[in-house]
Amino acid sequence: MDWFPLLNSLRVASIATVITFLLGIWAANGITRLPRALKGVLDCILTLPLVLPPTVVGFFLLKTISPKAALGGFLLDSFGWKLTMTWYSAIFATTIVAFPLMYRTARGAFEQLSPEWEACAATMGLSRRFIFWKIKMPNCRAGLLAGTVLSFARALGEYGATSMVTGYIPGRTATIATTVYQLWREGNDTLAYRWVMIDLAISMIVLIAVNLLEKRGGRQYAGSAN
Amino acid sequence: MLEARIKKTFRGFSLNIELNAGNETMALLGASGAGKTMTLKCLAGIERPDSGRIAVDGQVWFDSESKICLSPQERSTGLLFQNYALFPNMTVLQNLVCGLRRETPRKEREKEARRLLERFCLTGLEHHLPSQLSGGQQQRVALARCLARKPKLLLLDEPFAALDTHLRWQLEQELGDTLDMFAGTTLYVTHDREETLRLCGRVCVVQAGRSQSATPVWEWYHQPATRSAAHLAGFENIFSAKLGNDGRVHLPDVGISMEYPEKEAEAAAFRASSVRLGERQEEFAVSCRIVRSTEQELIVSPLQHPTSLIRALPDNRYSVGDVVWLNVPRTKIIWLKKEEAACLPQR
């Protein structure tokens, strides 16, 4: 059995998760300081990939980074970067699709923090950076971890946008999701079932992890809420 | 020394505060929703006033005219919230170290934090998380953390609101001692009469976003100037007053009329303890029926005005239904002047 799809999926999902983790927290933290109207519009845009069909995301991506599109063509001509039909093309697709999960969970976690901590810390002369790293982040830890695991799960399961920007090239761009589809088309049920079982196992582990984290989040620093 | 003028409109509510306080403990007294907490936030720099000026010890923290607005970090305030806002991920010691100036080396700060622990009777709790402390201990940690930076302005927002009543008295004494030692200005936000009487020297009543002129505590307690001040001072009986054509003043809801005491009395207030009940008619007496009798008070209602209720001290000579004369000695009636109009947001 060729294990490439598993390794590729894990590789793509891991990199995409690191990117969504940073971008999601940055966006969630930054948006709280914006004026209300701008906040509403931006929040809509940032959440959009969650509700859009992944094929629409894939379509937009192709219209941006494929060699025929303006940006994609420019990058190919000037730097020789080909951004579609490679294994890392999937990173763009999965990052966009998984981003809203990280962003929204992180925002929820930040919003649950008592604004009084930040206010108090500021009067104590603590810098914004200190407040973010030493007060906000530690107190949001469980929520942020849960968001990260969810994003990872979503990135791992992404099919629609990924298949549009990477295609299916065995041994080069194949992921678990695209492999299962390909195997079904070929009528290779035995192998398809095997990949399905692997995917099920990974998903179960991820969901259990999320649940454990959420439970721990509730207990963390227990009693401080009153 | 604090001089502050703050104007701010938010969500259809407008705040118009004027405060002048020396190095004393001044109560900012008002019903909930009167804008007291917002005032503290403006002073601390967490909220920005629309206009006004804030200066402490001659140093300008905010001035809308010369466009000065120091950040909370640049001001020198100690802010104590109702729920203390201790950082739950840090131990008591770490919370205190956070409160100390970052310029001092870490070793020094830890030493100073341990001195604070000792001063606030927290020794032995340094490695506890806030969630492992009792309410009273949490308050002490929060207070120590506020004072760690030696602020010029101490802002206390209902420090006893989160505590059980039976814990309060002891902690009030401790807080009183701490405030006595504090050299700067303390603003004490509360709606509690007893705390004000025990801990504060002067009172500034805040009503519907507007501050009234500050008065010494005894004056507010015995001679409140406005209806809201009288309510907060615990006057049980407050009735509207009207000037009659005969040059006398009437309390239409009670049925008393008397010579006009001074100009512009909008209402009259008297305490339950000033009410005398008896069989004999005196100067300003009304015939009343007893409508309710409890261990704490007697509620009577004038025969002529059965919907008005007057509160008096309990009296076991009378029971519900009895008709008695109600007298209020003239010297015990406080005349209240018209409340400055609650300012509406300008549109």
Image (tube, rainbow, N blue to C red):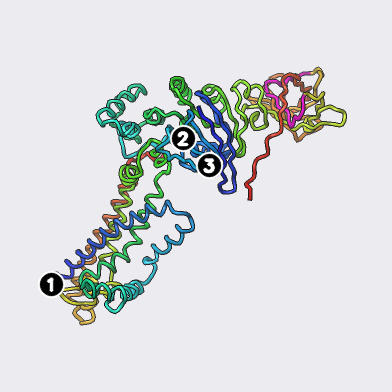
How packed mark 3 is, by other alpha carbons closer than 10 Å (few <14, some 14-19, many 20 or more), is: some
3D distance between C-alphas at marks 1 and 3: 70 Å
Say whether marks 1 and 2 touch (CB < 8 Å). Answer: no
**Position of residue B330 measured from the top left corner of the image (x, y, whole percent):** 76, 20
Name above or below for residue A154 compared with residue B327: below
Q: Is residue A116 visible?
A: yes
Q: Is residue A180 visible?
A: no
**Position of residue B54 measured from the top left corner of the image (x, y, whole percent):** 51, 35
Q: Check disc 2 and report its element: helix, strand or loop.
A: loop
Magenta-drawn segment: B262-278
**Position of residue B309 measured from the top left corner of the image (x, y, whole percent):** 72, 31
Q: Are marks 1 and 3 on the same chain?
A: no
* Residue placed under numbered mark 1 in the picture: A2
- Left/right of residue B145 with respect to residue A188 in the rendered view: right
* Residue placed under numbered mark 2 in the picture: B82
3D distance between C-alphas at marks 3 and 2: 29 Å
Residue B264 is covered by the magenta coloring: yes
Q: Are marks 3 and 2 on the same chain?
A: yes
The mark that comes first in sequence, 3 or 2, is 3
How packed mark 2 is, by other alpha carbons closer than 10 Å (few <14, some 14-19, many 20 or more), is: some
Q: Residue furthest front?
A: B66
Task: Say which mark, if any, is on residue B64.
Answer: 3
Name the amino acid, label 3: Ser
* Chain letter of the residue beneath label 3 in the structure image: B
* Chain letter of the residue beneath label 1 in the structure image: A
Q: Quadrant of residue A124?
A: top left
Name the amino acid, label 2: Gln
Q: Of circles 1 and 3, which is in front?
A: 3
Q: Of circles 1 and 2, which is in front?
A: 2
